[in-house]
Image (tube, grey):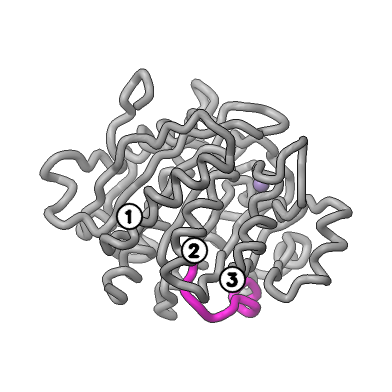
Amino acid sequence: MSAVDPGAFLGLEGDSCGPSSLGVVIPVPYEATTTYKTGTLKGPSAILEASQQVEFYDEWLEDEAQRFGIRTLAAVEEKGSPEQLADHLEAVVSEQLQAGRFPLILGGEHSISLGPIRAAAQIHPDLVVLHLDAHPDLRNEYEGTRYGHGCVMRRVLEAGVRIHAFGLRAISPEERDFYPTQQQATYVGARELLPLSGPDRVARILQDLPDGPLWLSWDIDGLDPSIVPNTGTPEPGGLDWYTVSELLRKLDLFERQIVGAELVELMPVTGQHASDFACARLAHRMILAGLRSKHRNP
Ligand SMILES: [Mn+2]
């Protein structure tokens, strides 16, 4: 664990975790390939600390995640390469999925996604990654590694997993040219979403979302920096709070199966806690949608 124990998600420790704990929160303070500003290492502990101030009742989904039982695991500390982390996390997440739990992974940089998604795809070969991000993360190689945060979704695609991204607005020429060659990777860019009204934004994201169990891979920089300024690459022109909240509500309403989730790339700054709290709030809404799905699909 970190030097200062941030406590458990929502403050659920000991008996308050609930007897069966359908949910498990896995902190992954990993940062090896971040390119611009650094500090995502402290993301998980900042979310855990802020989560202790989050109301149990979620007014969007009209339910409480804590009633399903949520346990927070000790942080996964991996000092090795992103490939080593992927193998390590694949094993950790696989164990939780096989035990019938819903995992929420807190990053850390986005390169942490590969192992958990591989673990979920082993159990659900028709898995679809619903990817919130400002960036496609589809480069073949970036800054000397094929497993860094700018490449993670390329490796996910190579693992045979479909990806539907939304909120993209910083795309490299390589990625622009790569998209038309791929059947398995679709996206709705921010430029297409932002002129629409809120409900139409959500409908547009869902319109191209393939059938199949979902993995939520959410990079907080997909949101507008006015909501979460403290992230490594705060791209202007991002999505709003309504869109992500209503998207989760619609996934729940339509009873889409959600098998796991991750929230990555918070870069906390001491004395500025709005970003931490927004991430904790969103993490709660994500795990609640996931737990309700898990409850319907044991
Ligand atoms: Mn990003």
Kindly identify which numbered label has been placed on residue 215: 2
Mark closest to the chain's N terminus, 3 or 1 = 1
Q: To which residue does mark 1 refer?
A: 95
Give x and y (percent) for residue 2: 38, 24
Which three-letter amino acid code belongs to the residue tagged 2? Trp
Q: Is residue 206 magenta?
A: yes
Number of residues whose C-alpha sits closer than 10 Å to that of mark 3, classed few (under 14), some (14–19) or many (20 or more)? many
Mark closest to the chain's N terminus, 3 or 2 = 3
From the viewer's perspective, is 118 left or right of 150? left
Figure quadrant of residue 39: top right
> Front-most of 164 and 49?
164
Mark closest to the chain's N terminus, 1 or 2 = 1
Q: Secondary structure at mark 1?
A: helix
In the rendered image, which quarter contains the C terminus? bottom left
Q: In whole angstroms, how far apart are the C-alphas of marks 3 and 1?
A: 33 Å
Number of residues whose C-alpha sits closer than 10 Å to that of mark 1, classed few (under 14), some (14–19) or many (20 or more)? few
> Front-most of 228 and 260?
260
Q: To which residue does mark 3 refer?
A: 202
State the extent of the magenta-drawn residues as a range: 202-214
Q: In whole angstroms, how far apart are the C-alphas of marks 1 and 2?
A: 16 Å
For discs 1 and 2, the disc positioned in front in the rendered view: 1
Figure quadrant of residue 148: top right
Picture residue at 78% right of the left edge, 50% below the top: 170
